[in-house]
Each structure stands twice: as C-alpha cells, then as structure tokens.
DNA sequence: AATGAGGTCAACCGCGTATGA
DNA sequence: TTCATACGCGGTTGACCTCAT
C-alpha cells in the first residue's frame, strides 16, 4: 500500500482549468510567489489539489513560457540532449528555458521519436546505432542553420547559457550573451534586467558573446575590469568586448560539444552548477 | 454530412527524493 | 534514526482536434 493520491479527496476538481481558476492562481502567486503549494488551494479557495496547482503554474501559467511549434534549432537541441541524457526531461528543459519539461516530453513522444526512427532507418546500421549521428543528419536535413559550423557553435553557446525566465524571447538574429547562466538578446532595454540578475561583478567579466552575423565569439567584460587596450564597444554602451576567436567554416567541434554537455550533466548531478531559478 | 482513425497535448498518477520534526 | 509530509519527475491517460474515407 502506497501513500494515497493527494487528489482522491472528495470535492477536488479535476480536468481542464478554466480561465477563472487561472486568474485566481496567477494573482495568488503574484502576491506570494511560487512554492508552498500545499497552502495554495486553502488560501485561494481553488477546488484543486496542490499538485494540480503546481503543474498548472509550471507548465502553463509561469511567465517566460514559449508556446507554439518548436524551431529546428530547438528540435536539434532536444534530440542531441535526449541522446546524451536519456529521458531526463527536466534536465533537458534547463537547456531550453522557454519550454517546459512536459512540452519537451510531449514533443519528443509525438514528433521526434517518429522522425528520428524514420531517419535512422535510412542510415547505415553502424550510424543508426549512434543517436547523435541521426541528430546530425536530422539537423542538416531540417535547416541550413545546421550546415554552418558557426551555428553549431551557437548551439554550443546556447547550452552555456541559462536564460533568466523574465528575459523575453530569444532571437537568432541577435547576439547572445552567456555567462554560464544567462542569455539575453542584445537589446539595451534588457540590460537592466541582466544586471539585476548578476550575482556579482565577476559575472559580467566572463560573459561570452556570439554574433550570428559575423560569427565572432567574444568575451564581454566589465568596463571597470577590462584592460582598456582590449576593449571594444558594445551597442548597449554598458560593456566592453574582447574578441577571442572567430569561427571558421571548418568542421564543427562536435566532440567538444558532446563532451561539454556530458560534463555539464555530471556537474548538474553534483550540484556544482547553478540552475536557473523559477523567478 | 457522418464517422472513425490517428495525432496532439494538458492534466493526472504514482513513485522517488528531499526535508524537517 | 525514523517517520510524515511536500515536492518534483517521468510515464500515462483521455479529451479534443484534424483529416481521410
């Protein structure tokens, strides 16, 4: 005999949420913040169990969630991460901060599994044995984005970046900024937000920048800490940049990408890396 | 127009883990 | 150390939608 399900209580409502219930839940969380889910039904008067409230919030109502179809870029990320991490949807979702684990899981089960199977069946047997091979194949099939090594680097950087959920949507035409914890479009308006999210001045010193147009990877550094001779100027006017490398058109460092993703996965298990907070 | 098959996705269920008394 | 409780995760379900017949 296991623990009785929390939703077996009499009077607990199940099924789809109504807009009215959503409003009640959102306004409560706006006041009290997410957490202490046990208290939510009591304090709001919602006839839902705490689990249902948490799920509704994390999978649907939470700010920063991107809905709609997955981009080829996201698709490639999911396939690759699934190959590396398995069905660890919550872990995979940390690499796609705008998507929920439920969304990713559903998309995998309904779209990608079939797509991958189809592609793998068309590959050489020894290639089909390695999911990442199929990933590369799918990636190149999906979009020209994946044909360029520069874009593979951008994917690498995407992994480095843990976006803050309140930073808005990403845009491939923008530069991306990563400090192993953040990703923001190069919009001046976003800088106040990223600055507020900084843990320390040191964070700003080690941000990485990938420019999709020029294929440059640069290190963005705090004006105060950069050597003036190395500083460039950024359109935001808030940081300087130090160019460290330019991506050529040779073979992408995919083995490095994979190694890093595996290292990252291990680091997550050890709790060595900071995961993005819900707020 | 009716209907049935298949696809999609929000929500539920049950288990494992973390935490605090 | 043990137990109870709360939370989070992955698997599964079922209502709804779309499309072919």
Image: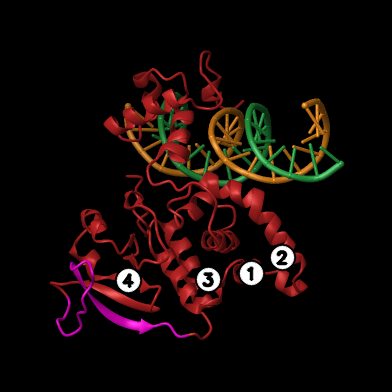
Chain colours: A red, B orange, C green
Instruction: Chain letter for mark 3, please.
Output: A
In the image, residue A24 sits, relative to residue A241, either above or below, namely: above
Magenta span dominant secondary structure:
loop
Q: Residue lying at the far top in this picture: please name it.
A: A10
How far apart, in angstroms, are the residues tagged by discs 4 and 1? 29 Å
- Which labelled disc corresponds to residue A75? none
- Say if residue A198 shows up in the picture: no
Q: Are marks 1 and 3 on the same chain?
A: yes
Of the numbered discs 4 and 3, the one sitting upstream in the chain is: 3
Instruction: Count the numbered circles shown.
Output: 4
In the image, residue B15 sits, relative to residue A251, either above or below, namely: above
Q: Which residue corresponds to mark 3?
A: A145
At x 32%, y 66%, the residue is: A177
Question: Dot 1, crowdedness within 10 Å: few (<14), some or many (≥20)?
Answer: some
Q: Which residues are magenta?
A: A226-248
At x 69%, y 58%, the residue is: A115
Q: Which residue corresponds to mark 1?
A: A141
Is residue A237 shown left or right of residue A24? left
Locate residue A57, reporting x and y percent.
42, 35
Q: Which residue corresponds to mark 4?
A: A208
Of the numbered discs 3 and 2, the one sitting upstream in the chain is: 2
At x 41%, y 69%, the residue is: A157
Disc 2 element: helix
Q: Which residue corresponds to mark 2?
A: A119
Compare residues A202 and A61 and report the one nearer the observer: A61
Of the numbered discs 4 and 1, the one sitting upstream in the chain is: 1
Is residue A216 shown left or right of residue A239? right
Compare residues A92 and A149 and report the one nearer the observer: A149
Question: Dot 2, crowdedness within 10 Å: few (<14), some or many (≥20)?
Answer: some
Q: Are marks 4 and 2 in contact (CB under 8 Å)?
A: no
How far apart, in angstroms, are the residues tagged by discs 1 and 2? 10 Å
Q: Are marks 4 and 3 on the same chain?
A: yes
């Amino acid at each position: 005999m296991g623990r009785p399900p929390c939703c077996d209580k009499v009077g607990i409502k199940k099924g789809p949420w109504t807009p009215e219930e959503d409003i009640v839940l959102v306004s409560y969380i706006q006041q009290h913040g997410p957490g202490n889910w046990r208290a939510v039904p009591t304090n709001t008067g919602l006839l839902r169990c705490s689990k249902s409230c948490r799920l509704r919030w994390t999978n649907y109502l939470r700010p920063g969630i991107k809905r709609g179809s997955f981009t080829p870029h996201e698709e490639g990320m999911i396939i690759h991460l699934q190959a590396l991490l398995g069905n660890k949807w919550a872990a995979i979702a940390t690499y796609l901060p705008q998507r929920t684990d439920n969304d990713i899981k559903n998309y995998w089960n309904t779209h990608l599994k079939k797509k991958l199977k189809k592609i793998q069946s068309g590959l050489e047997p020894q290639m089909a044995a390695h999911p990442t091979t199929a990933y590369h194949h799918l990636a190149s099939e999906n979009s020209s984005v994946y044909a360029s090594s520069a874009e593979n680097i951008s994917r690498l950087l995407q992994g480095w970046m843990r976006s803050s959920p309140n930073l808005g949507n990403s845009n491939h035409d923008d530069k991306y900024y990563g400090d192993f914890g953040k990703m923001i479009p190069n919009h001046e308006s976003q800088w106040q937000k990223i600055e507020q999210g900084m843990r320390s001045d040191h964070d700003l010193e080690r941000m990485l920048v990938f420019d999709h147009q020029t294929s440059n990877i640069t290190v963005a550094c705090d004006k105060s800490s950069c050597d003036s001779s190395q500083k460039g100027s950024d359109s935001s006017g808030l940081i300087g940049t130090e160019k460290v490398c330019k991506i050529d058109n040779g073979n992408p460092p995919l083995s490095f990408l994979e190694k890093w993703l595996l290292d990252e996965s291990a680091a997550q298990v050890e709790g060595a890396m900071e995961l993005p907070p819900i707020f």
